């Protein structure tokens, strides 16, 4: 039987040297949700930090798991597949929050399915779940300069921190990402797309 729980996964890389980097937008948004719903995270099989919570919104109470994979970005799928199998959570009850270089900083796009857009964490989850039919909250981080060192530039960019202006805007942006995630769960994907994708 499918679980009534939702699974919210924030993507990032574990360890202090990655804290506050663009690639850790998912972790940072997950932290906002953890604080908002008083979720405490503990180890799940060495693959993820995992906690359980309850969202009470608009008269709905929704039970959810919140996860931050410890597997490094490129193997995020191992953690997601393990948790979803262990708790019997289907893909249509999974929301993955991740950084996206195709969107300007501060933009959010909500979608389900579609291409991984070169994001290794998403590629890994698609592979491990054998489907891409889960919801994604894409948090824009803008992109590096294109050029001869495009790949290196990209790596340096996603593993880099935010400038002072963006740091000032970050708390509000992360709160929006948390709101978008809640909207997917409580009101559905279409409502979340209407509310957030055009902003």
Image (cartoon, helix red, strand yellow):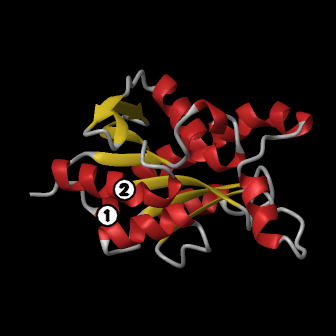
Residue drawn at 72 percent across, 54 percent down? 158
Which secondary structure lies at badge 2?
strand
Q: Is residue 188 visible?
A: no
Which secondary structure lies at badge 1?
helix
Q: Nearer the viewer, residue 60 or 89?
A: 89
In the picture of the structure, the residue carrying the numbered disc 2 is 94
Residue 173, labelled with which disc? none
Tell me the CA gap for discs 1 and 2: 5 Å
Which of the 4 image quarters holds residue 166?
Answer: top right
Question: Where's residue 110, x and y in %?
Answer: 57, 61
Q: Nearer the viewer, residue 156 or 191?
A: 156
Q: Quadrant of the N terminus?
A: bottom left
Question: Where's residue 196, x and y in %?
Answer: 65, 56
Q: Are marks 1 and 2 in contact (CB under 8 Å)?
A: yes
Residue drawn at 33 percent across, 44 percent down? 47
Instruction: Note whether 156 is above or below 165 in the view shown.
Output: below
Q: Is residue 21 visible?
A: yes
Q: Residues within 10 Å of mark 2 (few under 14, many from 20)?
A: many
Residue drawn at 60 percent across, 36 percent down? 28
Instruction: Note whether 199 is above or below 163 in the view shown.
Output: below
Q: Residues within 10 Å of mark 1 (few under 14, many from 20)?
A: some
Which of the 4 image quarters holds residue 124?
Answer: bottom left
Q: Nearer the viewer, residue 187 or 151?
A: 151
Instruction: Note whether 86 is above or below 127 in the view shown.
Output: above
72 horizontally vs 40: left or right: right
In the picture of the structure, the residue carrying the numbered disc 1 is 91
11 horizontally vs 49: left or right: right
Q: Nearer the viewer, residue 60 or 48?
A: 48
Question: Where's residue 79, x and y in %?
Answer: 34, 51
Instruction: Note whether 116 is above or below 74 in the view shown.
Output: below
Which of the 4 image quarters holds residue 102?
Answer: bottom right
Question: Where's residue 150, x and y in %?
Answer: 82, 71
């Amino acid at each position: 039987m499918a679980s009534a729980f939702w699974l919210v996964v924030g993507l990032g890389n574990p360890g202090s040297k990655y804290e506050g980097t663009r690639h850790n937008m998912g972790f940072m948004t997950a932290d906002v949700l953890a604080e908002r719903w008083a979720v405490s995270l503990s180890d799940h099989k060495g693959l993820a930090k995992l906690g359980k919570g309850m969202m009470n919104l608009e008269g709905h109470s929704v039970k959810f798991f919140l996860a931050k994979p410890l597997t490094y970005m490129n193997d995020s799928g191992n953690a997601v597949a393990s948790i979803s199998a262990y708790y019997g959570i289907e893909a249509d009850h999974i929301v993955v929050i991740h950084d996206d270089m195709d969107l300007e900083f501060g933009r959010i796009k909500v979608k389900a399915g579609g291409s991984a857009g070169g994001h290794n964490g998403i590629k890994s989850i698609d592979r491990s779940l054998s489907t891409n039919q889960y919801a994604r909250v894409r948090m824009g981080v803008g992109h590096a300069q294109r050029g001869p060192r495009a790949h290196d530039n990209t790596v340096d960019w996603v593993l880099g921190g935010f400038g002072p202006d963006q740091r000032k805007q970050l708390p509000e942006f992360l709160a929006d990402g948390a709101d978008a995630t809640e909207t997917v769960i409580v009101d559905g994907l279409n409502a979340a797309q209407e509310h957030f994708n055009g902003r």
